[in-house]
Amino acid sequence: MPVVFSQYYFLDSETKTFEPGKVIITTLPPIPTKGMTRNDLDDLSEMARHQMIEVFHDSSRDLVVQNKIVI
C-alpha cells in the first residue's frame, strides 16, 4: 500500500528546530499484484512511483494554498 507524505514547512533548517506546522499523509489503494512475476517489477515500480508523485504534488500544492506559503 503506497503512502505519500506532502512537503513540510515546519523544520527550521538553520536552527534545526521544529515550528508548528502541517504535513498531509495520503494512503493510496493497494496495488493488485496477482498474476505478476518478477519480470513485471520494473513496470509495477514505475506505476506506483507515478501515482505517488502525482499525489505528492497535489497534496503539497494544497498545503501551500491552505497555509499561504511561498515557495
Image: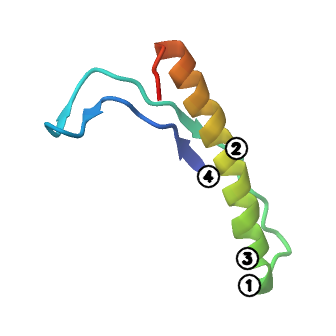
Residue with the mark numbered 4 = 2
Residue 46: image quadrant is bottom right
Q: CA distance from mark 3 to mark 1?
A: 8 Å
In front: label 2 or label 4: 2
Q: CA distance from mark 3 to mark 2?
A: 18 Å
Residue with the mark numbered 1 = 38
Q: Which of the two labelled residues, at mark 3 and mark 4, occupies the earlier sequence position?
A: 4
Q: Image check: 35 left or right of 58?
A: right
Outermost residue toward the right in this view: 35
Q: How many labels sit on residues?
A: 4
In front: label 3 or label 1: 3
Q: Mark 3 and 1 residues: CB-CB less than 8 Å, in contact? A: no
User: What amino acid is found at the position of numbered circle 2 in the picture?
Assistant: Glu
Count residues near mark 1 (Cα–Cα under 10 Å), then give few for <14, some for 14-19, many for 20+. Answer: few
Outermost residue toward the left in this view: 15
Residue 7 picture location, percent across and down: 47, 37
Q: Image check: 54 left or right of 12?
A: right
Along the viewing direction, whichever of 33 and 26 lies nearer the viewer? 26
Residue 58 picture location, percent across and down: 66, 33
Count residues near mark 4 (Cα–Cα under 10 Å), then give few for <14, some for 14-19, many for 20+. Answer: few
Q: Mark 3 and 4 residues: CB-CB less than 8 Å, in contact? A: no
Q: Image check: 42 left or right of 20?
A: right
User: What amino acid is found at the position of numbered circle 4 in the picture?
Assistant: Pro
Q: Which of the two labelled residues, at mark 3 and mark 2, occupies the earlier sequence position?
A: 3
* SS label for mark 1: helix
- Could you say which disc has been placed on residue 54 in the image? 2
* SS label for mark 2: helix
Residue with the mark numbered 3 = 42
Q: CA distance from mark 1 to mark 2?
A: 25 Å
Is 17 rendered above or below residue 53? above
User: What amino acid is found at the position of numbered circle 3 in the picture?
Assistant: Asp
Q: Which of the two labelled residues, at mark 1 and mark 2, occupies the earlier sequence position?
A: 1
